Image: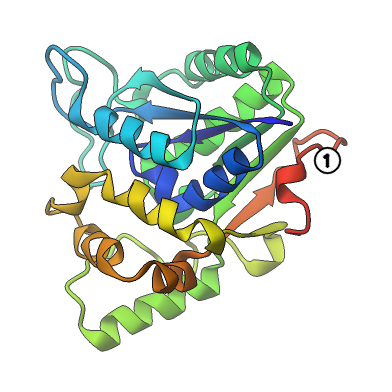
Amino acid sequence: MATVVAFHAHPDDEVLMTGGTLARAAAEGHRVVIVVATDGSTGEVGQGEPPRLGELRASAAVLGAARVVHLGYADSGNGPVLYPDPPDRVRFTRADPQEAAARLAAILQEEKAQVLLSYDANGGYGHRDHVRVHEVGRRAASLAGVEQVLEATIPRDLVARVLKLVDWLRLPVRHDAVAPGTAYSSRAAITHRVNVRKFAKQKQAALAAHQSQVNGTGRLAPIMRALIRIPAPLFGLLLGREWFIRSAESGATNHSDLFKGSR
């Protein structure tokens, strides 16, 4: 059995990019730990746990994760302006990469993690916090001696087809931040294709746990609302596969049974 640490930028990313894989790993007996760089809030949090971290814990419970950790940073946002840091913490994109990597490496060592899940070099669609997850994840894995680093992504041609469909259907979904030619990764670069249709119901329920995002005004909110309402078999057809790139920095040992037959 392996310990799998999934490193994400914000609460809800753990579902959208790796939810089925994490549910599958937990079901097969692996220890699953979710680490988020930010609490998903751009302003001062005040006393008590930020609401989105509470939603993350509910999502993690549905997926079968054993532990959730927040590295302590604030959401950097993805707009053209990077706002000043809140008074109580630093925005992740402004954090010292070495310090952030050391924080993550300490968790990896404590957990004796064999597998780290993070993001591809583009940070998916280029969100500044996602790009920093890629950079910090690689550095932390090297510091902690993690055997295998798998970077979550989506085939670039699939993203382009989905965006064309969104435009054709005139769905009220903004996707101006996604550059179809450069976002995510080419199919040739992808090393792991994980079938997670059996875990569609869990993935859908975990997504529904992020109520602030589902009921919010963000660019993905209309899609998220639609996804949590469709029948689970249809959800599985749409989101029943997840993709990863095995990092060149991974060691020679190919440890993870959880990806058996997924290459």
Q: Nearer the viewer, residue 33 or 41?
A: 33
Q: Looking at the picture, does residue 124 appear above or below residue 63?
A: below
Amino acid type at image mark 1: Asn
Q: Secondary structure at mark 1?
A: loop
| Viewer-closest of 17 and 141 | 17
As drawn, is 127 to the left or to the right of 122? Answer: left
The quadrant holding residue 36 is top left
Q: Can residue 164 be seen by looking at this rendering?
A: yes
Q: Is residue 93 above or below residue 254?
A: above
Name the residue carrying label 1: 254
Query: How many numbered marks appear?
Result: 1
Residue 244 placement (x, y as % from top left): 63, 53
Q: Around disc 1, counting alpha carbons within 10 Å, would you say few (fewer than 14), some (14 to 19), or many (20 or more)?
A: few
For residue 45, side relative to residue 223 (left or right):
left
Residue at point 17%, 43% (across, down): 212
The residue that appears at 65% across and 33% down in the rendered structure is: 30
Q: Which quadrant, please, contains the N terminus?
A: top right
Estimate the x, y position of residue 183 in percent, counting from the top left: 47, 61
| Horizontal relation, residue 139 to residue 18: left or right | right
Q: On screen, 99 above or below 199?
A: above
Residue 180 in view, yes or no: no
Residue positioned 61% across, 11% down in the render: 110
Percent position of residue 8, x then y: 45, 36
* Picture coordinates of residue 193, whole percent (x, y): 66, 61
Residue at the limit of the structure toward the right, as seen here? 252
Colouring used for the render: rainbow
